[in-house]
Image: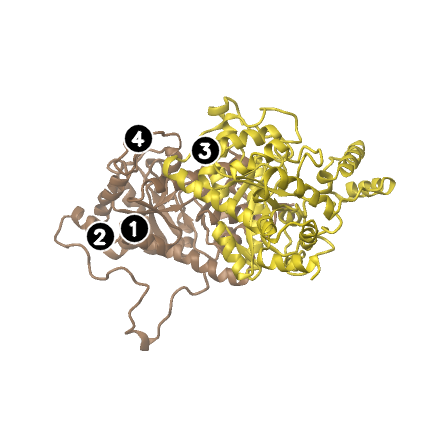
Chain colours: A brown, B yellow
Amino acid sequence: MADLQDELHTTGGLDAVPDLFEDEPRAPVSDPDGTQLERARAILTAHPVADGYSGLPWALRHLHWYDLELGESSVDTDVPRLRAGHVGALFWSLHLPEGIVRDRAVGATLEQLDLVKSVVGAHPDGLRLVCTAGQATDARHCGRIAVLLGPAQAAALDDSLGVLRALHSLGLRVLTLSGVSWAGETGLTRFGEEVVREMNRLGVLADLSGASTDTVARVLAVSRAPVLFTRSAARALRPHPANLPDDLLAGLGAAKGLCMVPLTPEQTGPSVRAVADHLDHVREVAGPECVGLSGTFDAGTAHPQDLADASRYPHLIAELLHRGWTESHIALLTWGNVQRVLRGADFTARAAQQRRRPSTANIADLDG
Amino acid sequence: MTSLEEARSLLREFPVVDGHNDLPWALRKTGYDLDARDIAQHQNAHLHTDIPRLREGGVGAQYWSVYVRSDLPDAVPATLEQIDCVRQLLARHPADLAPALTAADMERARQDGRIASLMGAEGGHSINCSLGTLRGLYELGVRYMTLTHNDNNPWADSATDEPNVGGLSAFGREVVREMNRLGMLVDLSHVAATTMRDALDATSAPVIFSHSSARAVCDHPRNIPDDVLERLPGNGGVAMVTFVPKFVLQAAVDWTAAADENLRAHGFHHLDTSEEAMKLHRAFEERTPRPVATVATVADHLDHMREVAGVDHLGIGGDYDGTAFTPDGLGDVSGYPNLIAELLDRGWSKADLAKVTWQNSVRVLGAAEDVARELQATRPVSNATIESLDGREG
């Protein structure tokens, strides 16, 4: 993981210099005497949710009449509910239904990107497309909800680094490494490793939710940038295949990756408290810098009671306050950790671009 | 001053906008080994194109073709790889190649003394019947799309295939309208004459022929019939004359038909450029000397096209690195001054030549941008599908 240093290590003499990278206020933002829900809203106002997975693009694909600005009952996500839920940023999944392969996967991903851009373009007061941590913060300062592009499936590359670079230049920032010959059950092939290195060079984050154990281990070893699990909870609490065992959570903590806990009964359980149990566990095993939230709305799954749509985040945060989470840990959970990971990806990319040319490797040469 | 010196001096002020160059395809055949084929150095042994010769040829803007084969299934990813190749070339040679997306970018590059670099996709197969994919290509920088290559696609007939939809289908017309809305030029090289006419009926922006010559001068389906050339003044478009001998010289047309037949008789595709196919080709050439086109052959086309379409509707599209043979005097991208000198000798005025080399081609892109701005105010993004408009699978 990142042995390149992202932060200034100031010596004693520079302690008086204000930390320019610290954009969060340090004083408590919530009234300690308020109700948990009031405190949750106050904290979320300062540290909104960066949600790791929204299935909205595919859900909107065949919906002919909708208006996310005014509210849309046929989906779980719209601007009024995102605002009520204090969501400040969302990763919009470009995942495709199973069965779209090869040439169709690339074309269908281009269509997904096009759809996202036209949806965001049609809601300029609510949504803004962003590619970096800084742009996400800018969007928030302008009162817009930041939309990040990804994750897309590995199949969207059609085994080509040229396609990866084209998708990156169209805005793609997260790629799920599973379901392809070079990132399958047996782990990363040589070409798979080259894909990860090229992703690092570009600043595309690896999403390992659903990846095989061997792939996860190899990506953690190869990647210089932090990795994401966009939809993974704790396997110690719920034995779902996409959930992470404790040793992996500990490894993720050491690598300063990010486990984004989904709000789905299959993975986290049927209630707010069940979700909070997972967040407690991941925080404990991986660390407070390595836990995040993943609404997983509009992705075809059910949701826990009281967390039925994007407006319900304050209830979850209230539960965490009830359990004694500090404001600073909540701030990391909702916004800070995603910011750090995005910055890490950008930093790694800038460093790698000094050293590496665009890779011309192809799968036939490396994997035979 | 000799006419060649005069041509060079004219090109310094109004350099060539070339409509079609297949360098990316030539590089793709090397696995995109941009070190082995470093275009900052002379690549005479391997390529028609490199930066020193583009400079020598007075090229000021180039549409790099992101062509991929139309007979293979992977057209969309392959096109993205071609686009990636062009972007890598631009990143490697920033002092010589200026990324350009607009007419204003082209003018800026000319003022900077850099070669404005644009992209054109060669064939509707590159969008796999998807307007979302078309918009993706536009966003990646593609500024024209040839509606077909050598094969028909489900919505447009090619000049070199059997008639299928009889020009453009309903979806094909929608592709043209969406290209208009985006500001992507409609390129009518390679398409059937029926498609040319349908596209001219459907388009609200000027069209281009990125590399086509006059059918009245040399009767080959890749060339433009006079009735279509006559429509260019009304449309505002530009026909960019190509140099490919087998399209511009009747004797070469006939010779090529025989050479293709020879390849097919040995079990090769007639466009195969593998070592073995080329060997057969060379043997054929030894038995049957290849008729040679010259600068004058190309100038004959321009003379005719000027008469029919008018000087405001002419341009140049060499098709370098996309053709095995070239005319004498136009052997590579350094040859354009010879063509300009020939036209000067034929009495073309400098003002007219400035239109042919630079002004007309810059004008059409700017006009396409203007049309796009207007359409975007009135026309929504089109998500039409071929199923909905043509009633069948793409």
Query: What amino acid is at disc 4?
Result: Ser
Q: Residue at x 37, y 36 (%)?
A: B378
Q: Earlier in the sequence, mark 4 or mark 2?
A: 2
- Mark 4 touches mark 2? (CB < 8 Å): no
x%, y% of residue A22? 30, 63
Q: CA distance from mark 4 to mark 2?
A: 30 Å
Q: Which residue is at the front of the view, A62 or A51? A: A62
Secondary structure at badge 4 equals loop
Query: What amino acid is at disc 3?
Result: Pro
Query: What amino acid is at disc 2?
Result: Ile
Q: Which residue is at the front of the view, B32 or B10? A: B10
Q: Is residue B125 above or below residue B109?
A: above
- Please state which of the two labelled residues, at mark 4 or mark 1, is closer to the viewer: 4
- Mark 4 touches mark 1? (CB < 8 Å): no
Query: What amino acid is at disc 1?
Result: Thr
Callout 3: 10 Å neighbours few (<14), some, many (20+)?
few
- The residue identified by callout 2 is A43
Describe residue A60's horizontal placement relative to residue B194 as left or right. left
The label shown at residue A74 is: 4
- Mark 2 touches mark 1? (CB < 8 Å): yes
Callout 1: 10 Å neighbours few (<14), some, many (20+)?
many
